[in-house]
Image (cartoon, grey):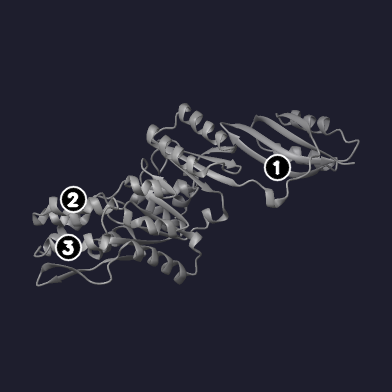
Amino acid sequence: MSRRFVVRATGPARPGQLAALATALTSADVTLLDMSQHVTFGELTLEALVQSGDGVDVTSLLCGAGDACGLDCRVEPLSEAPRVPAAETPSRWILTLMGASISAEVVAEVGALTAEQGLIVERVKRLSGEETTQSVAGVCFEWRLCGDVLDSVALRERVLALSERYAIDMALQPATVWRRQARLVCFDMDSTLIQAEVIDELARRHGVYHEVAEVTARAMRGELDFQQSFRERMRKLEGLDESVLEEIAQSLPLMPGVESLMAHLKRLGYRTAILSGGFTYFARHLQARLGFDEIHANELVIRDGKVTGEVAEPIVDAERKAMMLARIAEREGWEMAQTIAVGDGANDLKMLAAAGMGVAFHAKPLVRRQARQSVSVMGLDGLLYLLGYSAAELAEVMAAD
């Protein structure tokens, strides 16, 4: 009768250790069923599930091989409990923690939260590199979890509360095959790609800033219908000189991390688009500067060198953003699960909900609560960690260019 054992080998990493253990298994006709190996701070940890027939001294066999290559081996018999049917396999999750630093107190809180929800921590891996070499600022740890969430609403509320309390970003997402298969990333523009609301800056130059900014803030908080508020703000810009547009375009402050993010997305082969309730004039400027593949925004109507206070139809609102996201994906032959949307305002919520991954970036409270993922501390390039890329992988991509 065959028996199963769990083999655990630890010790200073050096070449040939895996080969030595595998050779020992082969010589005794022991079957390897599963294995995992990793090296942390120079220490190797190898775990394997093996099966042997009666009469095979697995412990002596493997411990002897371990001694020869500098590893401490432990062999534990595994009870022959029936395997869980595939239909009952626990769900798997990815929990991403990002911030300027991640303290032991944060780890304790997050560990307690996962335990409360019945989730098992299978692995914790650091995605960020050393502070002096990494391309994305901050620290990031990725937790691999398994289990079925007991209360998704309570979990979401606790995640948001912990994020705010410790000034970190926490994102929980299902561990699906689509995570590293996304092909399309769509961005809002104002207050997402740039640190400004362009319509407010135009109003500032036209002497109507306070009137327009108040309406903008209420619209982004979801207190006003976007199209109605947009037309109201546009009317106040009537008569603005066209030369002001170029001056503002040249001075728009980029959001931290956007240049790094776009450089990596281009090298990784993603298609990128701007879907904005702002203006094509400024979206084209960003496209030329950062390399977006396509833009969809509102077209200002200008006559005789003056802004008329009108825009060409159709107005890009929440519904149109979501529609354009789906239309681009369909045109390119991609599943919606392969799309990512990033935005900060209430008029981005439908786009965020439609995408395979919707990320509220430095968003208003309403948007942060409703979006599935949110980033409020890291720069835009923190999105790369949500996609599962490590600093080492990103460095390899840049070096290969």
Above or below — where is 153 with respect to 200? above
- Ranked by sequence position, the earlier of labels 3 and 2 is 2
Mark number for residue 299?
A: none
Front-most of residues 107 and 348 = 348
Give the amino acid at mark 3. Answer: Met
Mark number for residue 214?
A: 2
Is residue 3 at least partly visible in the picture?
Answer: yes
Does the residue at mark 1 contact the one at mark 2 (Cβ under 8 Å)?
A: no
Mark 1 vs mark 2, CA separation in Å: 59 Å
- Ranked by sequence position, the earlier of labels 3 and 1 is 1
Q: Quadrant of residue 236?
A: bottom left
Q: Position of 220 compared to 241: left or right?
A: right
Give the amino acid at mark 2. Answer: Glu
As helix, strand or loop, the secondary structure at mark 2 comes to: helix
Q: Position of 210 compared to 59: left or right?
A: left
**Residue 227, x across and y down, in percent:** 25, 63
* Residue at horizontal 53 percent and vertical 42 percent from the top: 151
**Residue 101, x across and y down, in percent:** 41, 32
Does the residue at mark 3 contact the one at mark 2 (Cβ under 8 Å)?
A: no
The residue that label 3 is drawn on is 234
Q: Which part of the image, by quadrant, shows the N terminus?
A: top right
The residue that label 1 is drawn on is 35
Mark 3 vs mark 1, CA separation in Å: 62 Å
**Residue 366, x across and y down, in percent:** 34, 47
* Residue at horizontal 13 percent and vertical 50 percent from the top: 210
* Residue at horizontal 40 percent and vertical 38 percent from the top: 138
- Depth-wise, is mark 3 or mark 1 nearer the camera? 3
As helix, strand or loop, the secondary structure at mark 3 comes to: helix
